[in-house]
Amino acid sequence: YLTDFGIVKVSQAAELTGTMNVVGTPAYMSPEQARAAREIDGRSDIYSLGVMLFVMLTGQKPYAAETDSGLLVAHATDPIPDILAVNSQLPRALQPVMETALAKSPDSRYPTAGALLKALQAAAAGRVDEATVDALSPLAATAARRLKPLLVVGVLLTLVVVVGLGLALTRNRTAADTDPPVESIPAAEVPALVTVAPTVATLVEATATFPPTQTSLPTATTVQLPAGFASTNTTDGAEILFVPAGEFLMGLTEQQSQNLQRNSQYCSPALRVSTPAHEVYLDDYWIYKTEVSNAQYQECVADGVCNPPANSYSKERANYYGNSQYADYPVVFVSWGDADSYCNWAGGRLPTEAEWEKAARGTDGRLFPWGDQYPASDLANTTFAKLDTEPVYSYPDGASPYGALNMAGNVYEWVADWFSATYYQSSPYENPTGPSNLSGELDRRVVRGGAFTYDLGCACSGTHDWWEYYEAGFAVGFRCAVDVNP
């Protein structure tokens, strides 16, 4: 009897889920499934089998949460629970086996179900399998090798793996990779003196007759990721944040615009065309947590896709781009085309102006990522608070409602849209992408967020500003967006 713990991937043609809904059983889903990673293989099933083993040996799941999305976060981020702390009667040799099966990184897990079976058989004999030891930290490995032989019912542990063996690592394997067949265990040989956990005894009893007693299995559900849920873009290693679908208030009210103009020397023209405030609906998407750094951009240049920045210096630094001292600082002197090329190379795209603004200010129409308070020195690099750029992970206290950093100040950021001074008067409600480039202002692309050299009005999250698309200055950079189902 085979059972599936969750659908690892769904064909786009199947249309089984809405955008960014995860299909599967949250209590049994691997960290990479929870993060919606692009590359998922059979080692995800090893993790799910490890969860099942944990339940059978302890009577409870390794992680608990009030919501399905909370369970996903727990699988992705919480430490691996100590199985001996839950059931102190279990053999100590099981602890390193469970730590390896439930490792957060697929590379740290058993590569095959056969390897997991071998480790369980070794634990049954009071040993720790060498593959298990190799996967542990040096300190844990030393302790594991010192385990003394323990008396344990090994047949039961073998049976547990036989139940789930058929599901794991059937994907992406050739005939040469297939493990030798595992012989079934006659029901008469299953020991009756099993007291590890009530659930284990129940499952052993169920295997004595076929078909087994019907029990309720976990029901597959669709889970909406929480706002700000973090994942990683595998191409450039950028941390990306999930922005769920819904409405938000885009642009500025007349009163907000007028108040900001009184404090803005440079951006009064942009503030005047940032009205009216209007409701916009966006589908799910991901946004980079930070601006693209010098080090990340260098990788694209090294791949022959991106052009080097127009200059290697910044405003105050003669040696900026290519200097390891500034690797984590935002790349500058890039045109709109340079930014667009990078995001495409990284598997994403430039965000639309609406996507950028929602990621910066949330849904409540606030002026800045942190609220309506004007920027202080600990919130943003603006109005010449510093003489040059700061690292992309600076100013955590000024993070947006989704956790994005430096969306006010530091550097202006290119977005996908062409600019039109009258666009907000007719902007569509759903997923706006800006005016066509036939609007009469052909050279202008929208930039957002202000920069260290500009004032409060420019740093406002609702300011509709622009630069000529071919410009590449010391105060302009970018971040990328990633589609939920690219």
Image: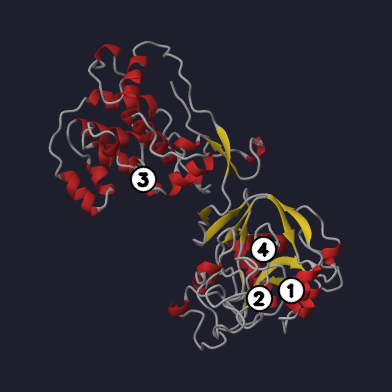
Mark 2 lies on residue: 450
Mark 1 lies on residue: 465
Query: Looking at the picture, which amino acid does disc 1 mark?
Result: Asp
Mark 3 lies on residue: 103
Q: Comparing marks 4 and 3, which lies closer to the viewer?
A: 4
Asked where in the image residue 371 lies, by quadrant, the reply is bottom right
**Residue at left 44%, top 33%?**
170
Mark 4 lies on residue: 356
In contact (CB < 8 Å): disc 1 and disc 2 = yes
Instruction: Tell me which numbered mark, 2 or 4, is placed earlier along the sequence.
Output: 4
Query: Looking at the picture, which amino acid does disc 2 mark?
Result: Gly
38 relative position to 121: left or right = right
Q: CA distance from mark 1 to mark 4?
A: 13 Å
Instruction: Tell me which numbered mark, 3 or 2, is placed earlier along the sequence.
Output: 3
Q: Is residue 118 above or below residue 320?
A: above
Q: Is residue 130 above or below residue 239?
A: above
Query: Looking at the picture, which amino acid does disc 3 mark?
Result: Ala
Crowd band around label 3 with a 10 angstrom C-alpha radius: few (<14), some (14–19), many (20+)? many
- In terms of secondary structure, where does tag 3 sit? loop
Q: Comparing marks 3 and 1, which lies closer to the viewer?
A: 1
The image shows residue 273 at horizontal and vertical percentages of: 81, 72
The image shows residue 134 at horizontal and vertical percentages of: 25, 48
Q: CA distance from mark 3 to mark 1?
A: 46 Å
- In terms of secondary structure, where does tag 1 sit? strand
Q: CA distance from mark 3 to mark 2?
A: 42 Å
- In terms of secondary structure, where does tag 2 sit? loop
